[in-house]
Amino acid sequence: MSRVKLVYFAWVRERVGIPEEEVDLPPGIETVADLVRWLKTRGEEYEYAFEAGDVVRAAIDRAHARPDAALAGAREVAFFPPMTGG
């Protein structure tokens, strides 16, 4: 089991109800997509935050990451909505 810091931004943070947390990842959580699926099982606030999982973006150790990105060795995973410039 590995410990990772999860950080939530913007409306993802509002829906989850906390800005960050540290969690012990259970066995089998190997990718960002696995992590999102697991988070959705942790309560209705997580389910609500990740209901449109294909919209929420992720970063592993401050580098943008795709859903199939491996979590091995990650210290931090951040989740945020898509951003636009202007």
Image: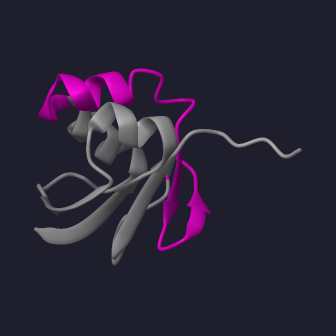
- x then y, percent, for residue 6: 31, 59
**How many discs mark residues in the rendered view?**
0
Q: Residue at x 46, y 29 (%)?
A: 53
Q: Is residue 3 left or right of residue 8?
A: left
Q: Residue at x 26, y 32 (%)?
A: 46
The residue closer to the viewer here, 34 or 59, is: 59
* Residue range highlighted in magenta: 41-68
Q: Is residue 83 left or right of residue 63?
A: right
The figure's colour scheme reads one colour
- x then y, percent, for residue 76: 37, 70
The residue closer to the viewer here, 66 or 85, is: 85
The residue closer to the viewer here, 26 or 9, is: 9
- Residue 76 lies, with reference to residue 18, above or below; the image says below
- x then y, percent, for residue 61: 47, 74
The quarter of the picture where residue 23 lies is: bottom left
Q: Is residue 38 left or right of residue 13?
A: left
- x then y, percent, for residue 1: 10, 68
Where does the C terminus fall, quadrant-wise?
Answer: top right
Membership of 53 in magenta stretch: yes
